[in-house]
């Protein structure tokens, strides 16, 4: 996470400097800019490798996650506080599961097929 924060901070500084001097040739001629961008790119590659390893770990723990793209899996993993947000991905993970019904405590109490059949827990 700190590698991403470093890249993000560097990018924000660069964008602020560029907005203050919008002349492309001058903005690109800043001393050390190319080295900073190369270092940021290396750090982003490390972040990507770490993220991919994390997603593979999650897939190894729950094989049905292999049916999802990395973006979809990240969306599911980031929505742990609101289980209703995973509904769009149900049909990719479980065949013919269209949606879930939740109680007040956000516990799944029923599931519905694409045809509207309801199975209660």
Image (cartoon, helix red, strand yellow):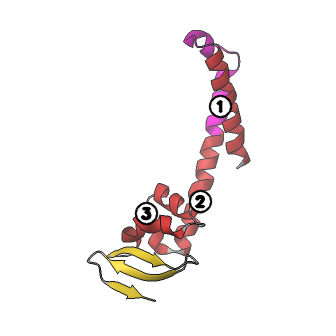
Is residue 67 among what the camera can see? no
Give the labeled residue for mark 2.
53
Q: CA distance from mark 2 to mark 1?
A: 25 Å
Instruction: Give the magenta-colored segment's residue range.
Output: 22-42
Q: CA distance from mark 3 to mark 2?
A: 15 Å
* For discs 2 and 1, the disc positioned in front in the rendered view: 1
Q: Which mark is residue 11?
A: 1
Q: Residue furthest left?
A: 115
Circles 2 and 1, Cβ within 8 Å, touching? The answer is no
Circles 3 and 1, Cβ within 8 Å, touching? The answer is no
Residue at image coords 59%, 67%: 80
Give the labeled residue for mark 3.
68
Q: Report the magenta stretch's main SS.
A: helix
Residue at image coords 37%, 68%: 92
Q: Position of residue 26 (x, y in %)?
A: 62, 10
Q: CA distance from mark 3 to mark 1?
A: 30 Å
Q: Quadrant of residue 53?
A: bottom right
Instruction: Name the foreground residue: 92 vs 39.
Output: 92
Residue at image coords 53%, 69%: 83
Residue at image coords 49%, 64%: 85
Q: Quadrant of residue 115?
A: bottom left
Up the image or down, 100 lies above or below 55; here it is: below
Up the image or down, 108 lies above or below 69; here it is: below
Instruction: Name the foreground residue: 105 vs 73.
Output: 105
Q: Is 27 contained in the magenta span? A: yes
Q: Few, some or many C-alpha atoms within 10 Å of disc 2 (few <14, some 14-19, many ≥20)?
A: few
* For discs 3 and 2, the disc positioned in front in the rendered view: 3
Residue 56 placement, left or right of 12: left
């Amino acid at each position: 996470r700190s590698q991403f924060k470093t890249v993000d901070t560097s990018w924000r500084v660069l964008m602020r400097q560029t907005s203050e001097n919008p002349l492309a040739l001058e903005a690109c001629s800043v001393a050390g800019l190319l080295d900073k961008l190369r270092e940021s790119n290396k750090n982003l590659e490390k972040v990507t490798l770490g993220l991919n390893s994390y997603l593979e770990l999650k897939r190894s723990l729950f094989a049905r996650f292999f049916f999802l793209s990395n973006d979809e899996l990240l969306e599911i993993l980031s929505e742990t506080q609101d289980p209703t947000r995973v509904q769009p991905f149900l049909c990719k993970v479980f065949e013919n599961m269209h949606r879930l019904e939740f109680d007040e405590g956000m516990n799944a109490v029923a599931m519905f097929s694409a045809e509207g059949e309801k199975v209660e827990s």
